[in-house]
Image (cartoon, helix red, strand yellow):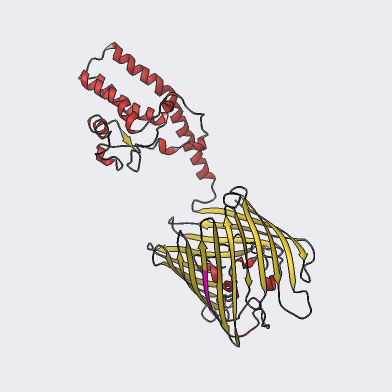
Amino acid sequence: MAKLFWQSLLAVPAALGAAVAVSGSAIAAEAATPMVSDFDQNSVQVAQITSVSELTDVLPSDWAFQALQSLVESYGCIQGYPDRTFRGQRSMTRFEFAAALNSCLDVITALMNQVSIEADDLSIIRRLQEEFFPVELATLRGRVDALEAETATLRAQQFSTTTKLRGQADFHLVTPFDGITGEANTSVANRARLNFDSSFTGDDRLRIRLQAGEGNAIDPSVLGGLANARGNDYNVTIDDFYYRFPVGSRITLTASARGLQGDDWVTDTIVPFDGPSVAQYGEPAFYSSGGSSSNGAGAGISIALTDSIVLDAGYTAGGPGAFNPNVGIFAAADQSYIAQLSFLSDGFLDAGIAYLHNDQSTNFQGGLPGGTDTYAALLNLDFGGFFIAGHGAYQAFNGGNDFSWTAGLGINDFGVEGSQLGIYGGQLPEVADTTNNPLLIEGYYEVPFNKFLTITPAVIYGDTNLGGGTDETGFWGVLRATFEF
């Protein structure tokens, strides 16, 4: 029995040190004590096992397999993580070593009741206990207690167990260098959003977005204005109200009460300018010029045909007809449909084709009767260090047709990791009651200062091409600050 005792004692440091790759410095010296919020709970969440085969990442071909098998099956003093892994290739902490050693010393204590232990052996056991137990295990228990108390406090103080609150605030400073008539002075434009995102299954999302803002520039009625500004005298409105949920592993359904139209129904708008750009029509303009009012209701479906090919479709019935029981969603005067097939890869090529139909108007100003049919193609070529992207859209409507496009290039991580330097431009859809197309060109540089703040300076040139003796061209400098929290 004494031999059994020594086998169990000597196997502990051998197996733990070899199979878990404990470094000498990790055992001999402890790093600075971390804050409670930094403590890795995975290091203490262990589960007792009865057979080495329960450890999914331990194979018979592993050089320490026999030692682990003996410790697990003969002595029952090796534990695994809750996911049934042993993680034998990573270094262990003093806390993990203390927990494992404590388990093996429990076996030794049981053996001590069965055999007589010499004084030297008892001295070794006491030294091991004094080395690891009073300090490491006491600290470990204290930190676990602190974590439990902190978790209980957070649960008690959170405003909802199902909802997260996310916010975004955008500040713009706009200076016209050669402003179009009516835009001759420096102005500001701001927008604030609060998103209440709720999930009831972990895979679904109910979003209710509150939004308010004031100010806009860059001739919103013709050139589209700013992407992150909505002038509404800071009146708070519900901008988004929808519920999205999966059906199986490849289908996602969306029911919208407000806020979704055009590109809101698609998985990706393909062109990388959409988002970083300061001007609204960094997003391809055909999505909104051929779409219905965003204050309507609708439904959408997204089908992942493969891991890279996605089919999106959506329907929007614009208000107020959609909310009037005497009219209804299928008889609303402003209805739109969209379908887009996208190829989305992690490599060189992203592309898409889209079809939109709108029962009301042809463009931003909505001056022509009858429906509009839009056929569009989108492309992004990612060369690693830089990308080239653009789109083209053909629109047919009662009495005519139109073609619009944009193209540009950009460099990701230019100077700063996470940044994007880009320039794009093109011909926007024609303005109602004219046969001319506005022109827009923008250069921007999006720079993330940290995870909360992004600064984007931009230079924008626009030509309304309206005629009539007015100043048709403008040249603006814009500085946008975006806070996310």
Q: Is residue 364 above or below residue 411?
A: below
Residue 389's spot in the image, x, y percent?
A: 55, 65
Residue displayed at 72% across by 66% down = 217
Is residue 155 visible in the rendered image? The answer is yes
Q: Specify whether residue 364 is painted magenta.
A: yes
Number of callouts: 0
Q: Is residue 447 left or right of residue 467?
A: left
Is residue 260 visible in the rendered image? The answer is no
Image quadrant assignment for residue 364: bottom right
Residue 79's spot in the image, x, y percent?
A: 32, 35
Q: Is residue 438 left or right of residue 3?
A: right
Q: Is residue 227 left or right of residue 17?
A: right
Viewer-nearest residue: 178 or 200: 178
What predominant SS class does the magenta segment belong to?
Answer: loop
Q: Is residue 369 above or below residue 158?
A: below
Q: Specify whether residue 398 is painted magenta.
A: no
Which residue lies most toward the bottom here? 399
Which residue lies most toward the top here? 119
Residue 166's spot in the image, x, y percent?
A: 57, 54
Viewer-nearest residue: 195 or 63: 63
Q: Is residue 316 left or right of residue 435?
A: left
Residue displayed at 25% across by 29% down = 75
Residue 465's spot in the image, x, y percent?
A: 71, 77
- The N terminus, quarter of image: top left
Residue displayed at 60% across by 86% down = 400
Image quadrant assignment for residue 229: bottom right
Which range of residues does the magenta coloring cover? 361-378
Viewer-nearest residue: 356 or 18: 18
Image quadrant assignment for residue 169: bottom right
